[in-house]
Amino acid sequence: MTPDEKKQIEDARRAWEARTLKPALDKTPDRPGLFAGSDGAPLERLFTPEHTAAQDYVRDLGFPGEFPYTRGVQPTMFRGRLWTMRQYAGFGSAAETNQRYRYLLAQGQTGLSVAFDLPTQMGYDADHPMARSEVGKVGVSIGGVEDMAELFEGIPLDRASTSMTINATAPILLCLYIAVAERQGIPAEKLSGTVQNDILKEYIARGTYIYPPAPSMRLITDMFAFCKDRVPRWNTISISGYHMREAGCTAAQEVGFTLANAVAYVTAAQAVGLRVDEFAPQLSFFFNAHNHHDGPIRGPRSALGHAALPRPDGGEHAHRPAAREQHRPGHRAGPRRDPRRLPVASHELHGRSAGSAHGKRGADRPAHAAGPGLRVRGG
């Protein structure tokens, strides 16, 4: 914007304030109190091109599918292939949840999202005294490979993308999943999906950790190393801001904390000899979507700006998005809290039997909209 164009807008705004705004305020003054977004930042009465006058469009925004990815990572957005839509589901036994998955796939859902009960998340067998009151309550109970086989009975794992919300026991559950695929005659390199596997946010906001931080991080970097060679289509981690947002942080803090965790994971992987370009394409992110218009748009797009973070190893893909994102609708925004005192939740706030969805649409999509050729077997 040229100085003359900026001055023209400023003059027009001042004229509007005198001509139209002042009479309206004289008649009905603003309500007392601060007008602010959900993050507490004050909102201007009016936004005009003056507010972006210093912005260089090509440098700061760019175009879809190109660095710095603030316009999205897909060049055509979703005019071609739609995003994967999956309802977060799991309850009771593996057989009961299998029936639910078959139903969801028959309704046109394009992927699966597994909710595990707390004993599974914490590494307890279903018959352990500590697990007695929690088996099958906020997710499905999985105690071994037979349970996992029953969970995916009749579902072709080479044609279904599966997201598993599992953290401390993620390596075990992924191994069980691979074993079930091998029983179906499907090699690990053909599997696609995600394990959440984000232990740092468990210490911060969710609470399903088992081991101290150092060995927990070692399990994660071991999974990076294993999957880059053996399960190359699998997202080895879903670095999550969602849970911290639900625990009380602001939208800006959600992005900041999440990227700080991402830096910690990348640094830990480099420390054991992994190259960024080897494992970064299998990283993914998970963010909250609240009902405030701007925040849920700005947050994920600013997170994509992680592409602009310095690359200490000079990786060749410094200008390529290294990770995918997923989003889940958040609950009603509560009061903001001191981020230094985020509560540790016993389990996810959305951890109900077959509740929240990944994405905006799920089981309401028509059956013909399912992924190409994805059909359950035997029912």
Image (cartoon, grey):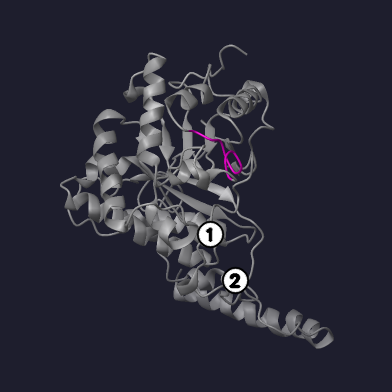
Instruction: Write the residue at 61% across / 54% down.
Output: 330
Name the one closer to the observer, 13 or 127. Answer: 127
The segment highlighted magenta reads: 134-142
Give the dominant element type of the magenta stretch: helix, strand or loop: loop
Work out how far the residue at label 1 is from the one at label 2, CA to CA, in angstroms.
Answer: 38 Å
Q: Amino acid at mark 1?
A: Ala
Q: Which residue carries the number 2 mark?
A: 47
- Please say if 175 is above or below 50: above
Residue 300 visible to an observer of this rendering: yes
Q: Quadrant of residue 39?
A: bottom right
| Residue 203 within the segment the image draws in magenta | no
The spot of residue 75 in percent (x, y) is 44, 40
The spot of residue 109 in percent (x, y) is 60, 29
Q: Residue furthest front?
A: 129
Q: Amino acid at mark 2?
A: Phe
Asked which secondary structure carries label 1, the reply is loop
Instruction: Write the residue at 47% across / 49% down.
Output: 286
The crowding category of the residue bearing disc 2, from other C-alpha atoms within 10 Å (few below 14, some 14 to 19, many at least 20), is few
The earlier-in-sequence mark between 1 and 2 is: 2
Asked which secondary structure carries label 2, the reply is loop
Is residue 219 rendered to the left or right of residue 72? Answer: left
Is the C-beta separation of discs 1 and 2 under 8 Å?
A: no
Instruction: Write the residue at 37% across / 46% down.
Output: 66
Mark 1 vs mark 2: give the one in front. 1
Q: Residue furthest bottom?
A: 26
Q: Residue furthest right?
A: 27
Q: Quadrant of residue 12?
A: bottom right
Residue 314 visible to an observer of this rendering: no
Is residue 243 rendered to the left or right of residue 199? Answer: right
Q: Which residue carries the number 1 mark?
A: 345
The C terminus, quarter of image: top right
